[in-house]
Amino acid sequence: MIPMVVVGLSHRSAPIEIRERLALPSEAVQETLRRLAARPSVGEALLLSTCNRVEIYAAPRAPEADLALLERSVVDLLADVGGQEIRAYLRRAAGREAARHLFRVAASLDSLVVGEPQILGQVKEARRQAERAGTLGPELGAAVRRAVGVAKRVRSETAIGAGQVSVPTVAVDLARQIFGELAGRCALLVGAGKMAETAAKQLRAAGALLLVVNRSPERAAQLAQAVGGEQRDFSELDRCLTRADVVVSSTASPAPIITKQRLRAVSKARRGRSLFLVDIAVPRDVEPAVNELDNVYLYDIDDLSVAVAGAQRGREAEAERAEEIVQVEVEAYVRRRAELGMKPVIVSLRERTRQVLHAELERSMRGKLQHLAGADREALATMIEAALNKLLHAPSTRLKELADKPEGTEYALALCELFDLRDEQGARPSVPPSVPPPPAGPAEPNGRDGARARPGPGGTPASTGASAGPGAVER
């Protein structure tokens, strides 16, 4: 069995108001990992945090340790961070299914926008953070390396990333439903990260005039120059809100920046003009209560997921091909890791046999065969090694073949008992726990699919026919 668990939540299992409780700034990730690794049951830990998911992957201190205890340690830590209420939303997997989940996440099969490329970079960044925190060990290191390889294979062997639909493309289409053509409309970007840049390019292509506001004036100026917009100081936010028709906010602020009170204060100067806000930040930048104001339409990341899902229909065949690749890779990974788990038993068996044979050879060399010359002695030693290899080839090979079968552990334990196998310290070699049989087919992710729909300006759920374009969803 793969000694690994994953515990967390995503857009499939929890609404944004729950997910934002676990949203961690990048500078807090390493300390959180160290806190988890300090618990007695935890040997390794990796934390993947995006705007759509927070997940912790963990491995025990000993391969044969109880994974249920490890899982409880991770759940307790997440509850400490996000409050006890989040326990009901946490999704958990262990062993084979934990590896499968990691492979699907890296391959962007569990993303809001299936096939988007950003999640792979975020998985790599999670690995770097764990390395810096000193919590990445051989088990999780091997799992992430294989996950990256699987993601690259999926992208090269399927067209899952072709005709990319994204949150920014969907947001622009929704803005068109409200305003018609966007040419000449004023679009305000609050935040200057990758998501803001992607949205800016979409809005610019639609003919909108761009204003960029960010707490870092230098970064705002860089983005404004890159997309042909105008940079404004953060102190001018209210003035920009007065002028804007469309607002896209994607900062890392821990609390809302655009509140109901703030928009009410600028509403008189706006003279009843409609305002469309897209909040793609987690935690949220825009207070949900702004929807209570007249002519204000707010979409957060969960609201947009319904439109994104609709725009991605027709790509099911590529996703199915990708799922097949993941399933094949999971079984191969489980088999390889199980074979490695049998290595201590095989090594002990060979060493035990070698000791017995060479002890008998040495005894004979001191007795009846003491007359043999050096060359003859070497020939006998070589013969002993050849006989050892031939004798143990079949059981070693068979043990590897059974490594990922439920009965593999029983055979390994029987060998240890029958041959009294011991390591250099005199202890029995570690034996991997019994591997459960694989599920009958790929399991669907737990949790809900999509999110609630936000009524459009006419009071009916908004729909979209988003066009293809580059995207960024997992942030």
Image (cartoon, rainbow, N blue to C red):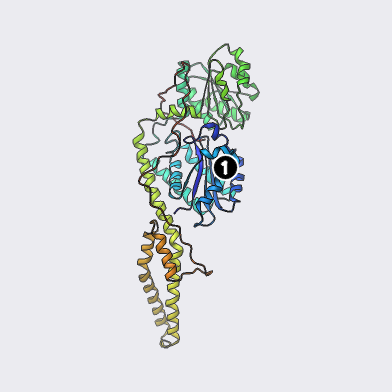
**Number of marks present in the image shown:** 1
- Residue 233 lies, in percent from the top left, at 64, 24
Q: Residue 411: x, y in percent?
A: 40, 63
Q: In the drawing, does residue 443 fall left or right of residue 262?
A: left
Task: Classify 441 as above or below 359.
Answer: above
Seen at 38% across and 62% down, the residue is 399
Judge from the rendering whether residue 255 lies leftward or rightward of residue 410; answer left or right.
right
Q: Residues within 10 Å of mark 1 (few under 14, many from 20)?
A: many
Query: Does residue 470 lie above or below 133 as drawn?
Result: above
Q: Position of residue 288 (x, y in %)?
A: 56, 24
From this viewpoint, which residue is outermost toward the top?
271
User: Residue under circle 1?
Assistant: 78
Of residues 428 and 352, the one drawn nearer to the viewer in this rendering: 428
Q: Residue at x 36, y 59 (%)?
A: 401
Instruction: Tell me what residue is drawn at x 33 percent, y 36 percent.
Output: 317
- On screen, 413 above or below 440? below
Q: What residue type is labelled 1?
A: Leu
Q: Quadrant of residue 397?
A: bottom left
Q: Nearer the viewer, residue 124 or 277?
A: 277
Name the residue at the left extreme: 317
Which is more toward the observer, 378 or 295? 295
Q: In which quarter of the image is the N terminus?
A: bottom left
What secondary structure is found at the residue carrying circle 1? Answer: helix
Q: Residue 213: x, y in percent?
A: 60, 25
Q: Is residue 370 above or below residue 244?
A: below
